[in-house]
Image (cartoon, helix red, strand yellow):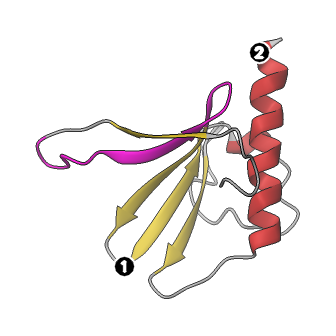
Amino acid sequence: MREADPEAIEEQKWKKPSNPAGVPVWSHDGIICVANELKGRLRLTFPKGASLADPRRLFNTRLDSKTVRAIDIPDGGSIDPVALKNLIRGAVALNGARKR
């Protein structure tokens, strides 16, 4: 995340008794991405993902949503780091454009 956007802020949000640590959330002029540990996988959710270009087709879940897109990475799996950085940069640019 920091390689793609050095100004991104990481916070732990949505703490609750069943998840006292909360979930990591990265933001820059709005939320960029949320990480959730699920059984057997890590899910990276982009709240405005449907508006992002994804030529490498990293998004593999939440594809029916009109706004959200997510990437499920199985335990032990990997992801194209360049394509992920491009999605992050796109999300930051989208947040900045909506701020104006």
Q: Which disc, if any, is residue 95?
A: none
In the rendered view, does 25 fall on the left or right side of 6?
left
Q: Main secondary structure of the magenta part?
A: loop
* Mark 2 → mark 1, Cα distance in angstroms: 36 Å
Question: Image quadrant of residue 39?
Answer: bottom left
Label 2 sits on residue = 99
Asked if residue 45 is positioned above or below residue 14 in the image, the reply reads: below
Label 1 sits on residue = 40
Residue 48 or residue 89, whichever sits in front: 89
In the rendered view, does 40 fall on the left or right side of 79?
left
The total number of labels drawn is: 2
Residue, x 81% and y 66% (percent of image)? 83
Q: Which residues lie in the magenta part?
A: 17-31
Judged from the image, the secondary structure of the residue bearing numbered disc 1 is loop
Percent position (x, y) of residue 69? Answer: 63, 50
Residue, x 55% and y 50% (percent of image)? 45
Name, please, the residue furthest toward the left: 17
Image quarter hosting the C terminus: top right
Percent position (x, y) of residue 91? Answer: 75, 41
